[in-house]
């Protein structure tokens, strides 16, 4: 009977009976963990219009946060990145080039990176064209004849994979595959630049 009583007491502190000790605020540490602390007692002005993280460092520090960081950035952070080399694009697989093309083509424009994004799209476009891909502007679609066959493959942006091109069934409209070696988009690199 003695063991049964002690095993019954342990679950009680996590049950309804245990909740009574929290409500009665008998144990100061338990109350702090369960109910928390009034943030205004720590010096936080909850009605302030500025961000709290700019003025409150920690509950363990008495002074307010300084706006200048207490560290020095290493000099290597101030070095300009090296120029983008188009030779790197020759090392990428087709899927990586498609990702670069579509990802940077559809990103919202932000002025500081606009020139870089435009260059990435242009270089990915040029490398895909040099590998025999043809960009069809009408459906923003990349097409290529499979080697050794007359079948035409296209890059499905939604599935991120190559699929056989069937006019009218690919969700790309009823455009016919490109003939011979001409660009399906009729462009000479202008497709990437116009986006």
Image (cartoon, grey):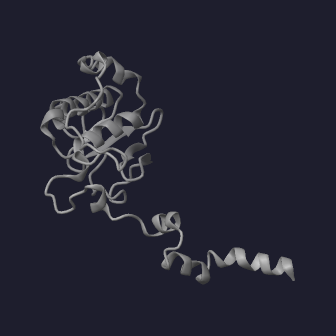
Considering only vertical position in the picture, is 14 above or below 140? below
Q: Is residue 25 left or right of residue 67?
A: right
Is the N terminus in the top left, top right, bottom left or bottom right quadrant?
bottom right
Between 151 and 117, the residue placed more toward the observer is 117
At 29% across and 31% down in the image, what residue appears?
A: 124
At 37% across and 22% down in the image, what residue appears?
A: 90
At 42% across and 52% down in the image, what residue appears?
A: 159
Work out whether residue 130 can be spotted.
Answer: yes
Is the C terminus in the top left, top right, bottom left or bottom right quadrant?
top left
Outermost residue to the right: 1
At 84% across and 76% down in the image, what residue appears?
A: 3
Query: At which x and y percent is residue 23?
Result: 49, 79
Work out whether residue 179 can be spotted.
Answer: no
The tally of labels here is: 0
Q: Is residue 69 left or right of residue 15?
A: left
Query: At which x and y percent is residue 17?
Result: 61, 83
Query: At which x and y percent is residue 100?
Result: 32, 36
Between 55 and 63, the residue placed more toward the observer is 63
Determine the image quadrant of residue 120.
top left
Query: At which x and y percent is residue 47?
Result: 17, 63
Considering only vertical position in the picture, is 12 above or below 29? below
């Amino acid at each position: 009977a003695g063991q049964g009583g002690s095993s019954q007491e342990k679950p009680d502190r996590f049950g309804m009976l245990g909740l009574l000790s929290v409500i009665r605020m008998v144990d100061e540490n338990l109350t702090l963990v369960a109910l928390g602390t009034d943030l205004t007692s720590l010096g936080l002005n909850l009605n302030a219009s500025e961000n709290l993280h700019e003025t409150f460092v920690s509950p363990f520090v008495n002074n307010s946060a300084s706006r200048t960081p207490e560290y020095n950035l290493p000099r290597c952070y101030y070095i300009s990145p090296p120029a983008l080399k188009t030779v790197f694009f020759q090392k990428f697989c087709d899927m990586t080039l498609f990702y670069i093309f579509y990802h940077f083509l559809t990103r919202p424009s932000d002025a500081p990176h606009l020139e870089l994004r435009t260059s990435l799209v242009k270089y990915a476009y040029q490398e895909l064209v040099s590998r025999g891909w043809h960009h069809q502007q009408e459906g923003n679609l990349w097409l290529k004849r499979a080697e050794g066959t007359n079948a035409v493959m296209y890059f499905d942006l939604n599935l991120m994979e190559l699929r056989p091109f069937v006019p009218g069934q690919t969700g790309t409209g009823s455009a016919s595959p490109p003939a011979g070696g001409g660009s399906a988009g009729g462009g000479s690199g202008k497709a990437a630049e116009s986006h």
